[in-house]
Amino acid sequence: MKNSPIRKVVIVGGGTAGWMAAAGLSRVLGALPGLSITLIESEAIGTVGVGEATIPQITAFNRLIGLDEMAFMRETRATYKLGIEFVDWLRPGHSYVHPFGSFGLDMLGIEFQHFWLRGRELGDTAAIDSYSIAAVAGKSGKFTWPQPDNRKSPLSKLSYAFQFDAGRYAKFLRGLSEQAGVRRVEGRVVEVLQHPESGFVTGLKLDDQTEVEGELFIDCSGFRSLLLGQTLGVPFNDWSRWLPCDSAVAIPCELGGANEPLTRSTARSAGWQWRIPLQHRIGNGHVFSSAHMDGEAATDMLLANLDGKPLAEPNRLSFTAGHRARAWEKNVVALGLAGGFLEPLESTSIHLVQSGIARLLSLFPDSGFSEVEIGRYNDETEREYVDIRDFLLLHYSATERDDSEFWRYCRNLEPTDGLAEKIEMFRSSGRIFREHNELFTEASWLSVMLSQGISPQRYHPAARLLDDAETLARLGNIRGAIRNTADQLPSQSDFLSERGGT
Ligand code: FAD
C-alpha cells in the first residue's frame, strides 16, 4: 500500500522547544494542504524558565521563521552576544574570551595559530584574544553587525548571537505560530494512547477528558520526557561521569557591573556561575555538583556574587547530563529537554532544539515512518551530543585548578577517545581538525585549548617562511587593525537604540 502524507502533527509542550518547533514547522510546511499542527501546553505545569544565552546559528533560525531582528530584540529584551568570557577556569585570577568568529588571518595558506605560535617564540606576548574582533569589541562593550563581504575588514570575521528572556521568546514565537495557523490547546496530558500492536502513539487524553489525535508527535515536554521516555521507554544515556554537575540554582537580578555583549562563566569551587546581561536585568545561575556542594551553600554563593539586587526567589533545578538513546522512536521525536541535556556552559541547548527541527524538516516522514530515515536522524543527533559533550569536557579536564575536591576530580577526568586525539594533535603540532562539520569550529577549539593551558610543542614549518621581523610586523598590524576597528564601533546600547531595538 502506498504511504500517505502526515496530516496531523501534535507538539506536547510550550517551552522554548515546543514553540520553536511550532514556528519552524508552520513556517516551512504550514502551506501543505490538509496539514494541521497542534501544540498542547499546561500553564499549571509551567516551563523550566531558564535558558537565555545562544550561539550564532540562532540567527539562521530567526531568519527561517521570518523574524524581524529589532522587533525580536525589543520583545525579548535581548542583547547581543559576541562570545563567552571564562573567568578562573584555568586558575583563579585568569580569564579569557571564547569568541564567536575566527582569529587573525590565515597567511601563505596556513592557519593563523601557527604564526601566532611563531610570534610567541619571537617574544610577542599578546594573547590570542587580541586577534579576535569579537573578543576585543566584546570586552569594550561595542557591537555592530558582521560585514562578510568586506574582506579587508576584521568585521568580515565577526559572528554574533543573542541573550534573551526565554519566556518572552516563547511568547513571541507563539504569536508567529498562531498567525501561521498553529492551534494551541491548554491542558494537561493525563494519558497517552497507543496502537495495541505497533505501540505507535495515536492520541493524547487531556485532564478535561478531550482527546487530541495525531500521526506525528513531537515531545517537547521538558525533563519529564512524557512520550519518548515515559511512554516509549527509550533509555537515557547517562554521561554524568564526564560531566558531574547535576544541579543549578538560577536567579535574575537588577542591572549592574559591566555592560558587555558577552556571557560570563566564572568557575566556582564545585561548578561555575553564569551571568547573562539582558536589557532590563541580568540572568544568573550557579551550576554545581551536588556530590561536592549542597544546594544551600550553592545558593548562598550565588547570592553573594550578584551585580545587582535579586528580582525573584532562587529557582533550584536538578538534571543528569546525557541524552535519550534514540531521539526518534516510532512516531515520536523528542526536542529540547525531553531529548537530553548538557549543562549550559557553551549555551548549546537551544541550538540542539534548532538543529533537531532542521533535521526533522529534512527527514520529514510519511505514514511509512522509514527506519532508514529514523536511523539517520538518531545517528546525527547522537553525534551532535557527543561532539558537544567532548567540547564541554575539555573545559573541565584542561585546568590547573586543584583547590577543591571537585576540581581535583575534574582535572583527573579521563578524556573520551575523540577528545584525547584532538588534544594530542594540538599539543604535538598546533593542528586542529573539525570533524564531520561538527558544531564547534577550529577557532572554538583553538580558543579553549590554548587558553586553558594546552601548549603546542611545535607549529607548521611554513610559519618560518616569513622572516622574524615580517612575522612580528604582520602580527602587530592584525592586532592594530582589530583594535582600531573595535574602537570605532558604537556601544551595544547605542547600536540597539539607534535601530529601535530597545
Ligand atoms: P520546558 O521549558 O520544561 O517546557 C516543557 C513544556 O512541556 C511546558 O510547556 C510544560 O507545561 C509542558 N508539559 C510537560 N508535561 C506536560 C503534560 N503532562 N501536559 C501538557 N504539557 C506538559 N539553553 C540555552 O540554549 N542556553 C542557556 O543559557 C541555557 N541555560 C540553561 C540553564 C539551566 C539550569 C537549564 C536547566 C537549562 C538551560 N538551557 C539553556 C536549556 C533551555 O532552558 C532549554 O533547552 C529550553 O528552554 C527548552 O526547554 P523545553 O522547552 O525542552 O522544556
Image (cartoon, helix red, strand yellow):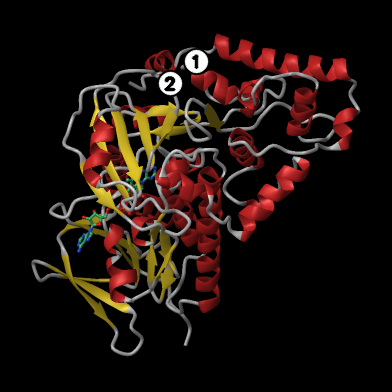
Q: Residue at x 83, y 37 (%)?
A: 460
- Quarter holding residue 203: bottom left
Relative horizontal placement of residue 378, taking residue 449 as reference (left or right):
left
How many numbered discs, if any? Answer: 2
Q: Which residue is mark 1?
A: 140
Label 1 sits on a secondary structure element that is loop
Q: Residue at x 73, y 32 (%)?
A: 113
Residue placed farthest to the left in the image?
Answer: 208
User: Percent x, y for residue 197?
Assistant: 33, 90
- Quarter holding residue 383: bottom right
Q: Residue at x 70, y 26 (%)?
A: 104
Q: Residue at x 48, y 56 (%)?
A: 242
Label 2 vs 1, first from the N-terminus: 1
Residue 304 visible from this viewpoint: yes
Q: Closest to the observer: 99 or 205?
A: 99
Q: Is residue 233 above or below residue 85?
A: below
Location of the C terminus by quadrant is top left
Relative horizontal placement of residue 232, taking residue 149 as reference (left or right):
left
Relative horizontal placement of residue 412, taking residue 23 as reference (left or right):
right
User: Percent x, y for residue 32?
Assistant: 41, 61
User: Percent x, y for residue 412?
Assistant: 53, 51
Q: Closest to the observer: 130 or 33?
A: 130
* Disc 2 to disc 1: CB gap under 8 Å: yes
Instruction: Look at label 1 and name its amino acid.
Output: Ser
Q: Is residue 232 above or below residue 420?
A: below
Q: Which residue is mark 2?
A: 260
Label 2 sits on a secondary structure element that is loop
Instruction: Look at label 2 and name its amino acid.
Output: Glu
